[in-house]
Image (cartoon, rainbow, N blue to C red):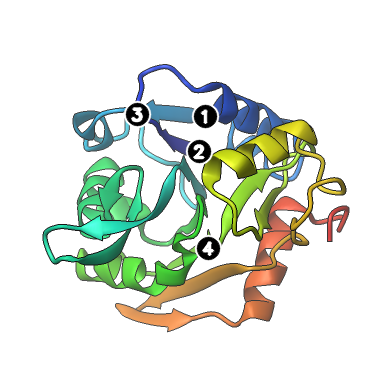
Amino acid sequence: MIWIIESKSKLSRVFAADLERLRANEAVATHVSRSVLNSTIAEMRTPLVPALDPGEPVLVLAHSGYDLDARHNREAPWIGGRWLDEFVQDVTLKFTPAGLSGRTLWFLVCHTGHDVTALAGLLAAAGVDNVTIYMPRDFMYISNTGIPHVLLSEADLGTVNKDVARCDSDYWSIQGSQPTGSYWAGCSISGQVVTTLSATAVEEAVQEQFDPDGTEV
């Protein structure tokens, strides 16, 4: 399934287009046929009904980044408008630790792959186990073939979004766009121990999931 987190109850134009492109990608179409949109903390914490099928991967489509966390007076990562500790509370209430365990979690977000191990540590502390997590380390967009890519840019989000839109999300036309799997991060939780995955292993996993034919590598 794909869990979409937005600030409004109606799917935005950008995320609606992302979902449509993912569903047109045969490699992941079955994994995103079911989508859940949440726009409030209460909705994010409402248990998923019906529960996930055994082994079903979870894709998370949300805005993310870094900002000043006034609670600790330092810059910190956030996902879907929530600091990581808050997000872990939300996601474990949504799916339960047992419901998340034994799965692969794909985060279709921007930048926060730099802190994927921090997220994993919080999930492990919450009782989640036997999970692999993948997350981009810079701007992320979904190409017009339904493949997520990292886009390296020093510009702000608005400018990046305009550049992607101007190129109609065409991977070959967007300056700074990286091959499938590049500039992602990943880690695993096993026996409550978090292990960082190598860049090569992460790249291969992302390619296998979203671009098995190597069309945008």
Q: Which sits earlier in the primary sequence, circle 2 or circle 1?
A: 2
Name which residue type carries label 2.
Met
Q: Nearer the viewer, mark 1 or mark 3?
A: 3
User: Residue 30 at what x, y percent from top left?
Assistant: 64, 36
Residue highlighted by disc 2: 1
Name which residue type carries label 4.
Tyr
Q: Which sits earlier in the primary sequence, circle 3 or circle 4?
A: 3
Tag shown at residue 134: 4
Labels 2 & 1 near each other (Cβ < 8 A) = yes
Which residue corresponds to the image point at 71% horizontal and 39% vertical from the top-left? 164
Residue highlighted by disc 3: 7
Q: How far apart, in angstroms, are the residues tagged by discs 2 and 1?
A: 5 Å
Element carrying mark 3: loop
Q: How far apart, in angstroms, are the residues tagged by discs 2 and 4?
A: 15 Å
Element carrying mark 1: loop
Quick one: 147 or 161, which is closer to the camera? 161
Name which residue type carries label 1.
Arg
Q: Is residue 149 left or right of residue 55?
A: right
Element carrying mark 2: loop
Q: Nearer the viewer, mark 2 or mark 4?
A: 4
